[in-house]
């Protein structure tokens, strides 16, 4: 657990634990949801595509040279064109996770989190998730095993990736409890199925293709398996048969005998798969949920500069069922303590129902600008939550001014931007931050300086202003103050402000 606020960890924590709010979990609920069939059951599933994509991204890893691994290089068309990466799953999955990536969440972190969330929400074990993966600038060297390869080649490929033969058996079984082989991609392995519930003719690895369970092992051991890589007509491509049988079935038998052993083994192996990163990449600690987490802080200075419109919400972890009294207490620059009662907004279960997350909102509060806000605590049923005495610090140095407005001219959105800076500081630069992507789809932020002469509107705030005419959707704000960069990563769009008067 870390101290809030920390922009990158806050974002990773939200991705990992915010369930329906994270933009990911809804794509694998129900577990047989599939993006390019409009969510309809097609025999394919996003969950399976994501897990396979993560494996193919990792499988280029070379533990001797420290190159390859989880770095989202699978998003490159060059990798997707290789015989070892057939089908459109990698392209569809990459597009989904590029869309989720932000300045704080790499595409590779998004893919890793998506894999964890898909497995956890579809019957699987809880999987340790770390962040900090770095997106590759170019494709990796090839290295994904293929079904026609010999057993010795598979053993060598997994050894290069850092997995023993027993771990190889485990990892393949953990992956192949989801999904199957597509007819259109592997016509030499799978015939056309003519099944209205399986319109893409996917021959599944086990009878429960959208859920994590040990059926892949029980069906294999009992001899009832329909796994196309075990009982396929062409023995050359029966790679699961060779791999599963390579230790005399000992590992698969242990999985068939114990669903718990299968679960715990997969939790460990899949976490290691996702944490296989190039040398030099430093992953974060395991991202645990914060028990009390403020979120979505909004501060806006009024047009006359006299008041601040403030609101926030707080997420409380695993509250007992029932009604709760939640208060926000806050400090300000005139050393007063204020409080307000929050209202229950929303309850979600996380990690496949293991936990609950409950959100509580403040109303929109009007603070005197002179007083501002410096620190928060929460009282939950009478117990004060203050991060062990630190409280939850709030910066009111830099915020949007309500004077900001947007205009729409010739398909361009033009922002008249007004940013308020507290007079206690003298920034050398105030700018807006426009999230975008570089030419290989990595998230970047472009700063556009506010260049109009700053205007002191009262004793408390000075307004910096400027215009942006670039095409953009969201804007953040930042400043350089005494050589330090201050960012308010409270992204706003034209929906948050009035239309400019003409
Ligand atoms: C020697 C190793 C492996 C071989 C030869 C192999 C081969 C295959 C093949 C041929 C497919 C069908 C793909 C398609 O039709 O589009 C497939 C699907 C899949 N593989 Fe593997 N695989 C291996 C290891 C793994 C591992 C280690 C994982 C993950 C931990 C994994 C996860 C998956 C998943 C989830 C699917 C289903 C994809 C879907 O239904 O869209 N595979 N695999």
Image (cartoon, helix red, strand yellow):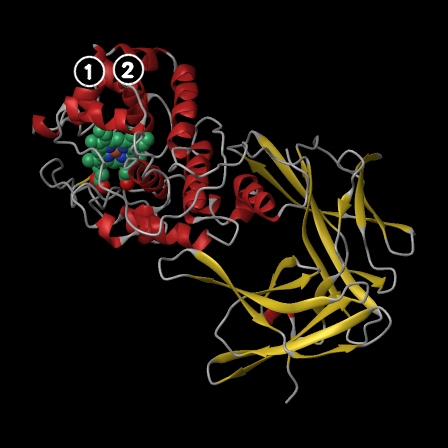
**Residue at 72% from the left image edge and 63% from the top image edge:** 398
For residue 356, above or below residue 497: above
Residue 199 rendering spot, x and y as whole percentages: 23, 46
Distance CA(mark 2)–CA(mark 1): 8 Å
**Residue at 29% from the left image edge and 42% from the top image edge:** 44
Between 444 and 235, the residue placed more toward the observer is 444
Q: Is residue 115 left or right of residue 394?
A: left
Between 117 and 34, the residue placed more toward the observer is 117
**Residue at 39% from the left image edge and 52% from the top image edge:** 96
Element under label 2?
helix
Mark 1 crowdedness (10 Å alpha carbons): few <14, some 14-19, many ≥20? some
Residue 70 rendering spot, x and y as whole percentages: 37, 39
Q: Which mark is residue 245?
A: 1
For residue 344, above or below residue 217: below
Q: Which quadrant of the view contains residue 387? A: top right
Whether tag 2 and tag 1 are in contact, CB under 8 A, the answer is yes
Q: Is mark 1 within 8 Å of ligand 1?
A: no
Q: Which mark is residue 465?
A: none
Quarter of the image with the N terminus in it: top right
Is residue 93 visible in the rendered structure shown here?
yes
For residue 309, above or below residue 225: below
Q: How many marks?
A: 2
Which residue, given by chain and number where applicable, does mark 2 sit on? Answer: 252
């Amino acid at each position: 657990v870390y101290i809030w606020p920390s922009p990158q960890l806050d974002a990773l924590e939200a991705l990992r634990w915010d369930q329906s709010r994270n933009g990911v979990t809804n794509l694998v609920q129900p577990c047989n949801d599939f993006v390019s069939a409009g969510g309809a059951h097609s025999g394919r599933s996003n969950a399976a595509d994501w897990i396979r994509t993560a494996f193919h991204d990792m499988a280029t890893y070379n533990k001797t040279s420290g190159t390859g691994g989880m770095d989202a290089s699978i998003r490159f068309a060059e990798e997707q064109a290789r015989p070892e990466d057939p089908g459109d799953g990698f392209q569809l999955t990459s597009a989904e996770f590029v869309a989720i990536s932000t300045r704080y969440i790499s595409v590779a972190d998004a893919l890793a989190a998506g894999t964890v969330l898909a497995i956890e929400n579809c019957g699987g074990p809880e999987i340790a998730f770390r962040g900090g993966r770095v997106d590759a600038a170019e494709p990796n060297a090839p290295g994904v095993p293929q079904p026609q390869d010999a057993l010795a080649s598979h053993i060598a490929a997994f050894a290069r990736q850092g997995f023993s033969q027993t771990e190889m058996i485990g990892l393949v079984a953990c992956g192949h409890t989801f999904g199957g082989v597509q007819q259109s991609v592997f016509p030499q392995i799978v015939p056309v199925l003519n099944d209205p519930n399986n319109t893409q003719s996917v021959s599944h690895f086990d009878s429960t293709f959208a859920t994590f369970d040990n059926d892949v092992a029980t069906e294999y051991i009992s001899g009832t398996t329909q796994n196309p890589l075990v009982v396929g007509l062409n023995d050359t491509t029966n790679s699961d048969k060779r791999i599963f049988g390579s230790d005399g079935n000992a590992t698969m038998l242990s999985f068939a005998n114990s669903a718990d052993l299968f679960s715990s083994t997969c939790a460990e192996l899949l976490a290691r798969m996702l944490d296989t990163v190039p040398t030099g990449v430093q992953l974060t600690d395991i991202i645990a949920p914060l028990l009390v987490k403020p979120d979505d802080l909004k501060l806006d200075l009024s047009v006359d500069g006299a008041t601040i419109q403030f609101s926030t919400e707080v997420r409380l972890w695993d509250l007992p069922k029932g009604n709760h009294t939640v208060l926000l207490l806050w400090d300000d620059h005139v050393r007063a303590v204020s409080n307000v009662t929050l209202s229950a907004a929303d309850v979600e279960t996380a990690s496949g129902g293991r936990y609950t997350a409950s959100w509580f909102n403040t109303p929109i509060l009007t603070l005197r600008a002179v007083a501002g806000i410096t620190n928060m605590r929460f009282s939950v049923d009478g117990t004060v939550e203050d991060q062990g005495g630190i409280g939850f610090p709030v910066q009111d140095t830099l915020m949007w001014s309500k004077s900001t407005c947007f205009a729409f001219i010739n398909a361009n959105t033009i922002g008249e931007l007004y940013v308020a800076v507290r007079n206690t500081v003298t920034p050398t630069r105030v700018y807006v931050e426009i999230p975008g992507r570089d030419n290989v789809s990595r998230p970047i932020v472009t700063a556009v300086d506010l260049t109009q002469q700053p205007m002191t509107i009262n004793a408390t705030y000075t307004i910096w202003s400027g215009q942006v005419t670039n095409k953009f959707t969201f804007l953040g704000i930042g400043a350089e103050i005494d050589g330090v960069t201050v960012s308010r990563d409270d992204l706003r769009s034209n929906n948050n402000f009035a239309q400019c008067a003409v």
